[in-house]
Image (cartoon, rainbow, N blue to C red):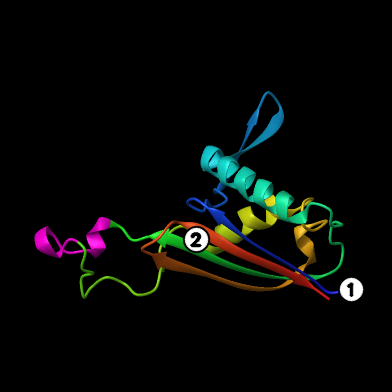
Amino acid sequence: MSQRIEFVVYGKPAQMGSKKAFVRGGRAIITDDNSEKRKQWANEVSSVAAEVMRGRDLISSPVQLRAFFYFRRPNSHYGSGRNATTLKASAPEMHSQTPDLDKLIRCLGDALTGIVFRDDALIWSMVISRHWTEKQERAEVEVTCD
């Protein structure tokens, strides 16, 4: 049976941080350098996804994931004084800076695991991108399966 789940998560999307490993007391410890922001964002994603999934079964077949991440432009993209609301000619059209797209999608996939689909390994195809926005920061997510 074909399924489509769509939702929007408002707030600044967070990325999975870089992992660091060290040994303490003979035990391996792995840390994430973006832990607090990542946890808050992942919890918000999980919460919104759980609301959309209410009454639906967990997906256990291959899925396609579409995710569009929107970030506010920094003030440096705009003029100053009377031009404070005008984009500079040098302002980039494409969002091609941090946060890394692959780290954003890792965080999103982990947050959806066990809520929308059984495991993020079920994602067989993705369309993902980062964009600038004048509106609210957010992630627009669509999961489909046949």
Above or below for 113 versus 33: below
Q: Which mark is residue 100?
A: 2
x and y percent of residue 117 in the render?
80, 58
x and y percent of residue 23 in the render?
65, 32
Q: Which residue is mark 1?
A: 1
Query: Mark 2 falls on what kind of element?
Result: loop
Above or below for 127 versus 14: below
Single out the residue that lies furthest toward the top.
Answer: 25
Quarter of the image with the C terminus is bottom right
Q: Residue at x 36, y 63 (%)?
A: 134
What whole-number distance in Å separates the C-alpha atoms at marks 2 and 1? Answer: 34 Å
x and y percent of residue 75 in the render?
25, 57
Residue 83 is inside the magenta segment: yes
Q: Main secondary structure of the magenta part?
A: helix
**What span is in magenta?**
75-84
Q: Residue at x 84, y 57 (%)?
A: 56
Q: Quadrant of residue 140?
A: bottom right
Tell whether label 1 touches label 2 (CB within 8 Å).
no
Is residue 6 rendered to the left or right of residue 71?
A: right
Is residue 133 rendered to the left or right of residue 76?
A: right
